[in-house]
């Protein structure tokens, strides 16, 4: 059976290799598969290339070697725009487009010439704790946490197969963080969407994930079930403390 997603031998070199005394690459030979609805927490200290990897998976950054397949189709054989609707990246620093909240939310349907499902969008806004916000408000006037949640809803409206989540709750208060965590867990279960979630919060990783990818020293040092990882995390590395 074909995996939902495969990456094989992904490598990202440093831009200026002469300044690197230990190795010439940020990470090398990353190989793994992802199945439908899998929830993966991507862990590791800062500087390991976690965000770069997510951007690479979304075709927002180029690999220096290696390849990727979605449903058995090579990335180079698929239209980039189609790939990004199936494998959608949500950045840590949300970018709002010019205009209102409503116009931002309608971006997806406008791009794909589809009817905007307002009922669905309002349900998602409620799920992230933004039920009462005025959609006529300028998106650029939102707080950082509000922008982050609007950007997440905007991405969910694409109905992607894989979500790439780059510390998407880092700017949120505890209540808003819980809203997002619960929504994404439920979304994965109901819609069968897989996600890779970069986080430095081990409690969050324990709550949201079924599987752990742990990056260290330029490799995918650990790829295992979350239960096993947290049961034996002391044996993996001191840097698991993040």
Image (cartoon, grey):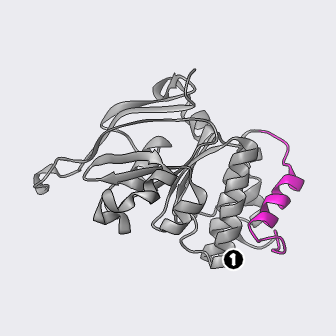
Query: Which residue is at the front of the view, 119 or 142?
Result: 119
Residue at numbered disc 1: 175
Whole-percent x, y for residue 143 in the image: 64, 78
Q: Is residue 84 left or right of residue 30?
A: right
Whether 66 is among the magenta residues is no
Q: Residue furthest front?
A: 231
Left or right of residue 218, residue 200 in this image = right
Q: Position of residue 144 (x, y in %)?
A: 60, 75
Q: For numbered disc 1, what is the local secondary structure?
A: helix
Would residue 128 be counted in the magenta stretch?
A: yes
Residue at 23 percent of width and 50 percent of height: 15
Residue 62: in sight, yes or no?
A: yes
Q: Magenta segment, which residues?
A: 113-135
Give how far across and how far down residue 217 sits, in percent: 25, 53
**Which residue is at 74% across, 49% downward?**
157
Query: Local crowd at mark 1 within 10 Å, few (<14), some, or many (≥20)?
Result: few
Q: Quadrant of residue 97?
A: bottom right
Residue positioned 59% across, 37% down in the render: 81
The image quadrant where one finds the N terminus is top right
Residue 90: quadrant of the picture: bottom right
User: Horizontally, is 18 left or right of 165 in the view?
Assistant: left
- Above or below, 226 against 206 in this view is above
């Amino acid at each position: 059976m074909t995996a939902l997603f495969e990456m094989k031998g992904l490598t990202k070199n440093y831009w200026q290799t002469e300044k690197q005394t230990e190795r010439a690459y940020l990470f090398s030979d990353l190989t793994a598969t992802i199945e439908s609805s899998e929830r993966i927490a991507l862990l590791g200290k800062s500087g390991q290339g976690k965000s770069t990897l997510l951007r690479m998976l979304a075709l927002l950054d180029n690999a220096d070697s290696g390849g990727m397949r979605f449903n058995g189709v090579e990335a180079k054989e698929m239209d980039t725009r189609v790939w990004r609707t199936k494998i959608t990246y949500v950045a840590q620093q949300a970018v709002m487009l010019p205009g209102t909240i409503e116009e931002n939310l309608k971006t997806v349907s406008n791009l794909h010439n589809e009817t905007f499902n307002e009922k669905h969008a309002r349900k998602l806004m409620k799920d992230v704790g933004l039920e009462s916000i005025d959609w006529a408000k300028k998106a650029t006037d939102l707080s950082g946490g509000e922008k982050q949640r609007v950007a997440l809803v905007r991405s969910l409206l694409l109905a992607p197969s894989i979500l790439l989540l780059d510390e998407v709750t880092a700017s949120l208060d505890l209540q808003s963080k819980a809203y997002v965590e619960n929504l994404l867990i439920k979304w994965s279960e109901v819609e069968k969407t897989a996600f890779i979630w970069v986080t430095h919060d081990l409690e969050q990783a324990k709550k949201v994930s079924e599987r752990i990818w742990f990056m260290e020293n330029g490799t995918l040092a650990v790829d295992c079930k979350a239960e096993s990882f947290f049961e034996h995390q002391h044996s993996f590395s001191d840097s698991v403390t993040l």
